[in-house]
Image (cartoon, grey):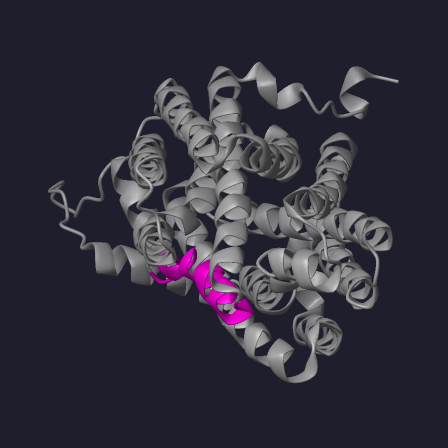
Amino acid sequence: MSETARPSALAPFRIRNYRFQWPADLLTSWAFEMEQIILGWYVLVETGSVLLLTLYASFGFVGTLIAPMFGVVGDRIGHRDLLAMMRATYAVLAATLMTLVLTGTLSPLYVFIIAILMGLVRPSDLGVRGALVATIMPHDLLIGAISVSRTTMDTARIAGALTGAGLFAALGMGVAYAVIVCLYISATVLTLCVVAPRKPHPVTDAAGDVLRVSPLRDLKEGVAYIWTTPRMQAAMWVAFLVNLTAYPLSNGLLPYIAKTIYGTNQTGLGYLSASFAIGSLAGSLALSMIGGVRAARLMVASTVAWYSALLVFVQMQTVPTAILWLLLTGFCQSLSMISVAVILMRAAGEHLRGRVMGVRMMVIYGLPLGLLAAGSLIEEIGFAATGTIYAATGIAMTLAIVAHWRAELWHLHAPGNAR
């Protein structure tokens, strides 16, 4: 058997730029997860309100509405430079929170303010890093590179969640935030070590003069491109659906589930978060080694499996059984989201990748909407009933998407299933 017949998960690291971007993304993701665990627990304990917890979690996604403009900026100034500026911003905001903790002046109000400021920038990080990966990687290594890139988020939910919860419980919030600041600063430096790819030549008219293209026109061009490409439109709807009805159950509501449903502490919350991430990591590694998958079919099958696993998870009453189902949920989630990213990156031209991923990040706005609705429903009908409604709705809507775009998603020779 030839060496090329079996893809290697380490193949993307042959590219110098990737050897710097991957650890930069890893440290950023670790810091994200540590902050989410620490601040989510802080808000729940200080306020005792699931509604305020979901409000805090929702603030982290306020920037999804302006995420397409980050894509436009990235296409113009370079994705490397934009990513470095974003990560420097995270470091400044985390340092501000650390100062408030160490001076004993932190309150839920300040946490909400910082969360809003962070939420303006943070949702675009995933899209900008994805566009940069697609720019620096050869076509034949793209699936592997995107799969391995997702391990930065998966390992973050393991190491970041457990480290954040452990430091918070053992040494206090101030020490935990000092570590977070160091992670953000290191990520910024590593991002700057990526050699920025050459920017596309400016658009010119027939006389050779450079055309003055407005950012709004750039954005409209990206949205129009997605809207007229059926497989991209279908992938966007799947991404919006899972953010609305799947992620709230396994992300933003975990502090509530841990404390109220299972009666556990920060450490138990860390185990629950890490179990989802271990499953996700397994999915990312499996896909990085398989390669050559039919992305559209995989997206559909794994999304249905994801919702099916959630349907069982929300009925669990003990931490061990919840961990088992979160492992499976994370595995299916990873396959689904990698498939979405591959479909979008393969269909997008190089000069449009930033805008396409910016619009992809905008659909994350479904997550705060789903969180806020879940917070209200839980107080009325309970967590299990709310989760059942969310998961059942997700399955029904996924099947509706498949039925509408069957030719683009399920036919063996559809563009979305090209290997």
Query: What is the quadrant of residue 370 in the picture?
Result: bottom right
Magenta residue check for 347: no
Magenta residue check for 64: yes
- Which residue is found at the position 63% from the left and 69% from the top? 245
- Which residue is found at the position 66% from the left and 32% from the top? 144
x, y (%) of residue 56? 44, 60
Left or right of residue 113, residue 45 in this image? right
Between residue 329 and residue 116, name the one nearer to us. Answer: 116
- The furthest residue to the front: 104
Q: Report the number of numbered marks.
A: 0
- Which residue is found at the position 59% from the left and 74% from the top? 374
The range drawn in magenta is 49-65
Left or right of residue 351, residue 29 in this image? right
Between residue 295 and residue 253, name the one nearer to us. Answer: 253
Q: Is residue 165 depicted above or below 413 in this figure?
A: above
x, y (%) of residue 344? 54, 51
Q: Is residue 414 depicted above or below 346 in this figure?
A: below
Whether residue 405 is visible here, answered yes or no, is yes
Whether residue 349 is visible here, answered yes or no, is no
Quadrant holding the C terminus: top right
Query: What is the quadrant of residue 5 in the picture?
Result: top right
Between residue 40 and residue 303, name the one nearer to us. Answer: 40
x, y (%) of residue 339? 66, 49
- Which residue is found at the position 46% from the left and 37% from the top? 173
Provide the major secondary structure of the magenta segment: helix
x, y (%) of residue 281? 71, 37
Quadrant holding the N terminus: top right
Q: Is residue 82 depicted above or below 417 in this figure?
A: above
Left or right of residue 400, residue 353 in this image? left
